[in-house]
Image (cartoon, grey):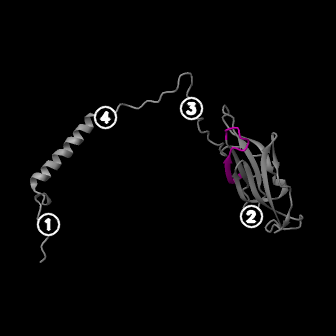
Amino acid sequence: MQHSAVPELAHTHARPIHWLATATAVAGVMALSSVLQPGSATAAQPAGTQAKSAPAAVAPPTTTGVRFPIECGPVKAVVAKKATGDLDRDGRPETVAVVHCDASVGTPPDAVYVLTQAADAQKPRVVATLVDPKDRLTVTDFAVRAGAVTATLLGYSSSDVPSCCPDLKDSAKWQWKNGAFVRSNPSQARSA
């Protein structure tokens, strides 16, 4: 066994009195901290200024109960997809809905509608039709981003093409400009 060159120090061995002294010191610090609490924080505005509160979050219009301008006969209209965003930059979000008739067979054409709701209105209303169901298009890759509505549109080169098998594919993007939704990339249909 090798002996240390330094003699043993008395404080290197903890004894019960050391533990008692440490516990007493910790208890004293905790008791003192509970008595000495900081005052409540207050925020003061510089003289002559008023605090401006952040605008309350506005919920986007719901599609529930909305009568869409699509003729479905005995079946009802179905919202297949929807997305929200502030398209006209007025601080209130709009909802964009892809709607088609609930057909039991075939591929019913889609329509794309923009909904808005005034602050004092009880129900949302359709304010724009971006894709009319009469155009016989199917909407895919649908999104609302950065104030624009984008979609891929699948269509038909003639009325002879069966509705199961669209043979044209087009990209579309709509943005609010000068009081109307403008399609920024005109139809440039290409084969699917």
Question: Could you tell me how far apart the alpha carbons at marks 1 and 3 are, in whole angstroms?
Answer: 69 Å
State which tag comes first along the sequence, 2 or 3: 3
Q: Quadrant of residue 24?
A: top left
Q: Which residue lies under the disc numbered 1? A: 6
Q: Quadrant of residue 123?
A: top right
Report the span colored magenta: 75-92
State which tag comes first along the sequence, 1 or 3: 1
Q: Which mark is residue 105?
A: 2
Query: Is 146 contained in the magenta span?
Result: no
Question: Could you tell me how far apart the alpha carbons at marks 3 and 4 are, in whole angstroms?
Answer: 30 Å
Query: Mark 2–mark 3 contact, CB under 8 Å?
Result: no
Q: Which residue lies under the disc numbered 3? A: 53
Q: Which secondary structure, mark 1?
A: loop
State the residue at coordinates (82%, 47%).
Answer: 182
**Left or right: 56 with respect to 32?**
right
State which tag comes first along the sequence, 3 or 4: 4
Which mark is in front, 1 or 2? 1
Query: Mark 3–mark 4 contact, CB under 8 Å?
Result: no
State the residue at coordinates (77%, 48%).
Answer: 175
State which tag comes first along the sequence, 1 or 2: 1
